[in-house]
Image: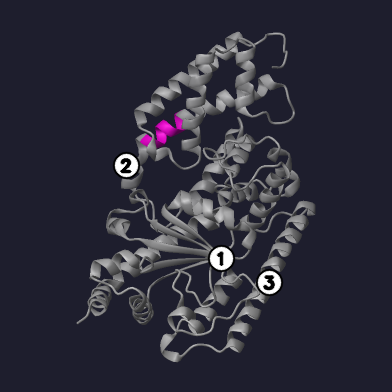
């Protein structure tokens, strides 16, 4: 057997591994995209044997393979994930989610010097068949490809072997993915003969229709944003809430390529339970956002402002987080309760101390509108009630609180929670002792 046959034989024995690796990456991305309110169709596949053989033969004619290892270095899409976005204008946000979910080794944007009949990986099919090249009027395939690995931290013990798999993630609009599939199947078939100039022209015309369709989708997205901003009815789902937040954040001059919305699904559940899932309720809080989005996404910051010092709302938000995280229907057992009891008690005591601290800040502000805790802490320092060292300690406390509230309590040691609880009680007592007694606001 030749080198290509040897590689294909190995791949056939490994195909289940590649399918499972792609499916795992697809599941992670689908969850993260959906929770952030991005509408997309996410699919996965291992490369079909027939397509692999076609690709290898085309490339081997151009540059003959010397060994199986040379083929392994050359073929990077044995496992693939497709993200088909409803709205092409959300490409940058989708890229941020990919980068935060998976380890990105390489990134490629299309079109980039692409010739007609070229496979998205760069294979010049038309040239390999020695046919006349049709010069297109439109830009062709528009997408972003990422070569990624799944971080081990995202895998459970049974999935750890998939961390070694190199996976290609292709992101484009739903229309562009459909056109690309048609073009690939018609053009990338060396055994069926080259397309005629008329067929290439028709593919080019279809590409123009797809590009026009993408413009229409962007206009549809804008029209939906305007409707949501003016609507007085509740958001129908977390996707509508996400669209509203994108519009509001952009209006503030915040570039969404530098921001992430975060767990919009949890925020929507919370607002729905509180019967406040409306644009009129959410909008005033958007103007209070602090622009440290890498550490604190938009949805997390909004929730923090809405929860401030209110134990009932904290409880409602915890329920929303638990519902969003519920991944199985397994009943809670007595053993589960016993195993998590120390953690539950420590978290409860820490949160009780933090809520009392926030309530004190809210009372001192004497404002009918919410004032971010960070702003109040700076006012306390300016008034000489807190020292700069205590301000730094409170910044650490806020980060710890964010871990607990937004679903990362398991990363915090119980001893650390207990120490933080005692410190919060002390700093709250200190502020109460030093606060103005004449009722003046800070």
* CB atoms of marks 3 and 2 within 8 Å: no
- Foreground: disc 1 or disc 2: 1
Label count reads: 3
| Residue located beneath label 1 in the image | 111
Eyeballing the image, is 51 above or below 337?
below
| Residue located beneath label 2 in the image | 339
Q: Nearer the viewer, residue 338 or 242?
A: 242
- Foreground: disc 3 or disc 2: 3
Q: CA distance from mark 3 to mark 1?
A: 17 Å
Q: Nearer the viewer, residue 162 or 285?
A: 162
Magenta-colored stretch includes residue 348: yes
Secondary structure under badge 3?
helix
Q: Residue at x 38, y 65 (%)?
A: 22
Q: Residue at x 37, y 81 (%)?
A: 54
Task: Look at the image and name its color scheme.
Answer: one colour
Q: Quadrant of residue 369?
A: top right
Q: Which residues are magenta?
A: 343-349
Eyeballing the image, is 423 above or below 170?
above
State which tag comes first along the sequence, 3 or 1. Answer: 1
Q: Residue at x 72, y 16 (%)?
A: 441
Residue 202 image point, x, y percent: 63, 84
Quadrant in which the N terminus is drawn: bottom left
Residue 130 image point, x, y percent: 46, 84
State which tag comes first along the sequence, 1 or 2. Answer: 1
Q: CA distance from mark 1 to mark 2?
A: 54 Å
Secondary structure under badge 1?
loop
Residue 207 image point, x, y percent: 63, 76
State which tag comes first along the sequence, 3 or 2. Answer: 3
Position of 106 with respect to 97 (left or right) is left
Q: Nearer the viewer, residue 312 or 168?
A: 168
């Amino acid at each position: 057997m030749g080198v290509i046959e040897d590689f294909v034989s190995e791949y056939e024995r490994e195909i289940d591994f590649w399918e499972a690796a792609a499916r795992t990456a697809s599941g992670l991305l689908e969850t993260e995209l959906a929770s952030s309110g991005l509408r997309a169709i996410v699919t996965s596949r291992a490369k079909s044997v027939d397509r692999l053989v076609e690709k290898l033969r085309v490339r081997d004619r151009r540059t003959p393979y010397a060994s199986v290892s040379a083929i392994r270095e050359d073929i990077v899409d044995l496992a693939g994930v497709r993200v088909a976005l409803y709205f092409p204008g959300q490409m940058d946000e989708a890229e941020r989610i990919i980068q935060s979910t998976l380890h990105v080794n390489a990134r490629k944007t299309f079109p980039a010097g692409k010739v007609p009949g070229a496979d998205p990986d760069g294979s010049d099919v038309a040239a390999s068949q020695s046919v006349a090249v049709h010069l297109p009027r439109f830009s062709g395939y528009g997408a972003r490809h990422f070569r990624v690995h799944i971080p081990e931290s995202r895998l459970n013990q049974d999935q750890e072997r998939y961390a070694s798999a190199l996976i290609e993630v292709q992101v484009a609009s739903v229309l562009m993915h459909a056109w690309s599939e048609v073009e690939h199947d018609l053009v990338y078939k060396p055994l069926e003969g080259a397309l005629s100039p008329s067929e290439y022209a028709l593919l080019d015309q279809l590409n123009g229709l797809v590009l026009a369709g993408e413009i229409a989708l962007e206009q549809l997205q804008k029209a939906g944003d305007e409707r949501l901003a003016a609507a007085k009815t509740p958001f129908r789902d977390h996707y509508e809430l996400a669209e509203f937040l994108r519009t509001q954040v952009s209006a503030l001059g915040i570039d969404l390529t530098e921001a992430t919305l975060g767990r919009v699904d949890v925020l929507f559940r919370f607002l729905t339970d509180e019967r406040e899932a409306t644009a009129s309720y959410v909008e005033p809080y958007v103007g209070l956002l602090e622009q440290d989005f890498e550490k604190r996404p938009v949805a997390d910051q909004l929730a923090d402002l809405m929860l401030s010092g209110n134990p009932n709302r904290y409880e409602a938000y915890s329920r929303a987080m638990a519902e969003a995280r519920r991944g199985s229907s397994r009943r809670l057992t007595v053993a589960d309760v016993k195993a998590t009891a120390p953690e539950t008690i420590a978290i409860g005591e820490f949160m009780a101390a933090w809520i009392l601290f926030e309530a004190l800040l809210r009372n001192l502000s004497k404002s009918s509108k919410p004032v971010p805790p960070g702003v109040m802490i700076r006012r306390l320092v300016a008034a000489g009630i807190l020292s700069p060292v205590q301000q730094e300690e409170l910044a650490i406390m806020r980060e710890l609180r964010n871990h607990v509230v937004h679903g990362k309590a398991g990363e915090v040691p119980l001893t650390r929670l207990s120490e933080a609880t005692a410190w919060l009680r002390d700093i709250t007592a200190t502020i109460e002792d030093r606060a103005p007694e004449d009722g003046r606001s800070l």
